[in-house]
Image (cartoon, rainbow, N blue to C red):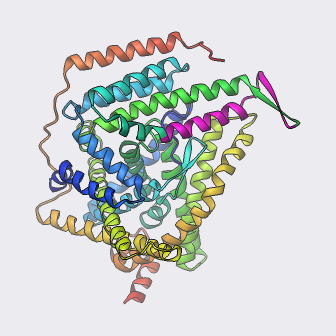
Amino acid sequence: MAILLDMRRGKEQKNKWHIYEEIGTEMSHFNLSAEIDRYAYTNALSKNSPVTKLLFALSLLLISVLSPSPVAPITVFLTSTSLILFCAKIPLRFYLRLLWYPTLIVALTCVIIALFFGYQEPLAEVNLLGLRWIIFRDGVATGFTTFFRVAGALSSQFFLVLTTPMTSILLVLRKARVPKIIVEMSLLIYRYIFVFIEVMETMRIAQELRLGYSGWLKKLRSLSMLIGNLFIRTLDQGERTFTAMSARGYDGNIRVLEDLPKPSNVALAGIIFFAVALAIIAYLTMDLRIV
Amino acid sequence: MHIMEGFLPHPWWEIWFAVSIVVVILGVYKLKKLTERFPEAKPLLAVMGAFVFVLSALKLPSVTGSCSHPTGSGLAAVVLGPAIASVLSAIVLLFQALLLAHGGLTTLGANIFSMGIVGPFVGYGLWVASKKVRLPTSVGVFLAVALADLSTYVTTSVQLALAFPSTSFMDSFITFGSIFAVTQIPLAIGEGILAIFLFDFLVKYKGKLLSAMNVIGLRVGLQSQEDAK
């Protein structure tokens, strides 16, 4: 219970992370995970039923991964992006910040696939300084479909990630009869990830204030001290939490009031209708070729 | 090595899911038994999980639809055994997909297979073997963790090459493998060195629990503990 309450203090966390941002840390990934977590609790759709959101995101994800042509993934991308921006009211800047990096990597990868892979039908021949380079039709096709498939899948993943708090996903898992030990370990790991990040940031700031990162050698020394102590500190804190919880009657079950909102039938019907329509579109456009 | 959401085409992600789920279920069974006997091991298990999360989130981009980073699952396998390490990795990979959009839900099976199954089993195998031939503990830990990391990436290359064969499977395996190798060999060595220190620390402070859990060799655990005293 204490853990859950701790997790729900979205606002306090916000101020804290804000301070860290101002000091300017380089550990951007971890700030990112804290920020995503914050949006998951505070977005405009956070009060909707997690079952609905989970169902929606997973069905779109499956359709865009299974669809052989790019039409369905593009539809998925547009739908979930507009839901993220207009219904969940996630700021455009933050969404773009999340999106640009994977998109760039996937685009690069798909260009490589298009240029180097494939062997069936030559599409074009390029003369590069005397080197003959053949680009194949199936390679280009694979590159294109892969790019759009990833775009569709990523956007539906982001929809789930940005609108649904981790605790409600875990509560849904518990209702779905996932083994108790998994849910419990997940809750503990979830908590300790943030303990880890917090301990790390605190120590980093302390080191930085003492000019621990002012030179290359000092940086190396400080970093190794940081990593070594990080584990010790986190384990220590984790054990103290565990002792405190055991003293209060913790027996492996974290009992919380499951005040999850009920899924509305209209929303469920709408999702099923949309998913079926998308699946039909994916089926009809199966033989569509771009190149 | 997290393969991005949607990057694996149709038959492959289902296949990896089917393979991984068997081992994870076995791991859940073992985890359940372990925590029933030793509830006090839970913080250690969870911190280990968080450690795997943090290490494998330190990623460098890579143009293979994936990325390069230390994995952390090798150390978890040495300390907790490979089956439990695979459950922890599965939970961590799910979290990374949901908290960082790092890796994906459909590619979860493939990612569990490389980071949570092949890595830990290779690492644990090497750790047991190195104890058999009486290598020093630190060398054993280093080898286990560094090679667990590398074998994870070899597996990812295999997975990518199977899904995207160019002229032949081998061709594409070499392409993906060589892209990974550039960044991964130094990262694996770094992770191995880090693991030596952490293992030392764990044996010193948690040696009793670990040898009671009977997951690390009794002799190694107790010996180092006495050394510490």
Which residue is found at the position 35% from the left and 45% from the top? B99
**Residue B83 lies in quadrant:** bottom left
Please indicate whether residue B203 sits to the left or right of residue B165 in the image.
Answer: left
Which residue occupies the foreground of this view, A238 or B20? A238
Which residue occupies the foreground of this view, A24 or A70? A24
Which region shows up in magenta?
A101-129
Image spot of residue B95 (x, y percent): 37, 47
Image spot of residue A206 (x, y percent): 33, 72
Please indicate whether residue B177 sits to the left or right of residue A178 in the image.
Answer: right
Which residue is found at the position 70% from the left and 40% from the top? B172
Which residue is found at the position 28% from the left and 41% from the top? A39
Q: Is residue B151 above or below residue A285?
A: below
Is A109 part of what is drawn in magenta?
yes
Q: Is residue B219 above or below residue A88?
A: below
Image spot of residue B131 (x, y percent): 55, 74
Residue B82 visible from this viewpoint? yes
Q: Is residue A201 above or below residue A44?
A: below
Please indicate whether residue A268 sits to the left or right of residue A155 in the image.
Answer: left
Query: Which quarter shows the C terminus of chain A?
Result: top right
Please indicate whether residue B147 sits to the left or right of residue A54 in the image.
Answer: right
Which residue is found at the position 16% from the left and 31% from the top? A261
Which residue occupies the foreground of this view, A32 or B226? A32
Residue A166 visible from this viewpoint? no
Residue extending furthest toward the right: A130
